[in-house]
Image (cartoon, rainbow, N blue to C red):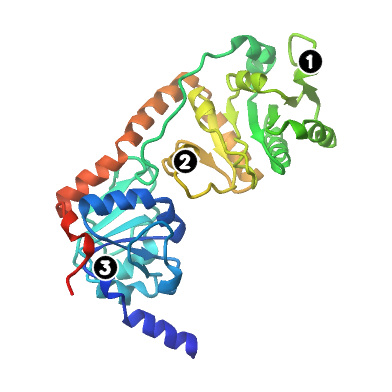
Amino acid sequence: MFSRLSAWITARSVPRDARERIVVLGPHTTLAAAADWLQELAATTGAVTLGVTDARQDNAATVPGLEMPTVALPPDLAPERLPRLQPRAVLVIGAAGALGPALARLDTPRIWVNAAGAAPTGVDWALVLAARSGATEAPAEVIGDPIAGAVTLPELPTRDTDFCERFREYHEKGWPILLAPNTGPGEEAFAFAVLFAVLQKTAAILLLAPADPARHEPVYRDAIKYSLPIIRHNRFMTSFVPRKNRVYYIEDPETLQAAYSCADITLPGGTLAASETPPDLGLPLAHGSAVICGPAAHEPHPDAATRLRMAAEHTGLVAHGEDPEQVAREVLARLSEGVDREARCRALAGWQARQIDARASVQTRLQALLGATGKSQTGPSR
């Protein structure tokens, strides 16, 4: 009874200072990750109210670091609450299907950014922008991911063909070389599980490089328990790695740098399991490796590594799996597409250019649609 009364009161009232603004709708984590972009949006296009779609009370909707009104707008309350905000425009980030009934009741411009999933029925969009091709069946312009904004990549390094020559037999047979660099606790087991799943379909070798030198010996001893033929780089004495081997164990940073040149597919440490190791996507991408991330979430703050991963995942530049079986399926899918480093590097250059312009593209279109109204930052007059 009390919960129903509380929901009714929440639905019937909205904060006065949240009205007559651009309402940006999205889950709490998405809005937090987009904090600096939303500040830019408010400065150039007009005052913003945040509509948190996974909060049920306004006091649970506050987004740290953003001095903007926040309102709880879950799909069941949004049809009642959203019109009461009298929004100047509504901008939805990400999936929008569940918000259809609320959006259909509005006659203000509706904008869909990072459009993904099914389009809500009965909603006429003024603008639909997608981070990647195929994200939604709705007609959309693909512009990249404005939440992450511009990203930086390392200079294209020289490929170490001498080191890679030791894996000649794998290349000749068309067997993939997987790399799990800078792994932390729990991530080696994840990488081995991926390898086992891949080995059910094709021979392969995993280049494994734990991040912490203090873990090198314990991880090696643990790896032996998996009964996978394993070679330690610092004890390798012959010219070529025999085809029977399944793990090549790396224990120094110089060898790891060389290994990036050889990997067909990279499973970045820091993404396979909860870890303090920051994931490095830049180097494998610059080398033309296909990158597949695991389920470990990134921190929602705008450092360079987080921005790169966010942009790469949102735009489909890298693949993602929630468990070893999904990651293995993505590995096999990339292999079926073929390994073409030069083509990947060309695509990477085009992707980076589009990503650099993503925020400016959104701002230009919004200002053309809504006009620049930076003067209304304080919200409606009382």
Q: Earlier in the sequence, mark 2 or mark 3?
A: 3
Query: What amino acid does circle 1 point to?
Result: Phe
Mark 1 = which residue?
236
Q: Quadrant of residue 316?
A: top left
Residue 352 locus on image (x, y percent) = 37, 31
- Residue depicted at 63% across the width and 17% down the height: 171
For marks 2 and 1, give the CA distance. 38 Å
Check disc 2 and give the amino acid type.
Asp
In this figure, what is the number of numbered marks? 3
Q: Residues within 10 Å of mark 1 (few under 14, many from 20)?
A: few
Name the residue tied to disc 2.
Answer: 303
**In this rendering, the label closer to the viewer, 2 or 3:** 2
Q: Nearer the viewer, mark 3 or mark 1?
A: 1
* Nearer mark to the viewer, of 2 and 1: 2
Give whichever of discs 2 and 1 has the lower sequence position.
Answer: 1
On the image, numbered disc 3 is attached to which residue? Answer: 104
Query: Which one is in front, 82 or 334?
Result: 82
How would you rate the neighbour count of disc 3 (Cα within 10 Å): few for under 14, some for 14-19, many for 20 or more? Answer: some
Q: Residue at 27% x, 51% y: name it.
A: 41
Does residue 179 show up? yes
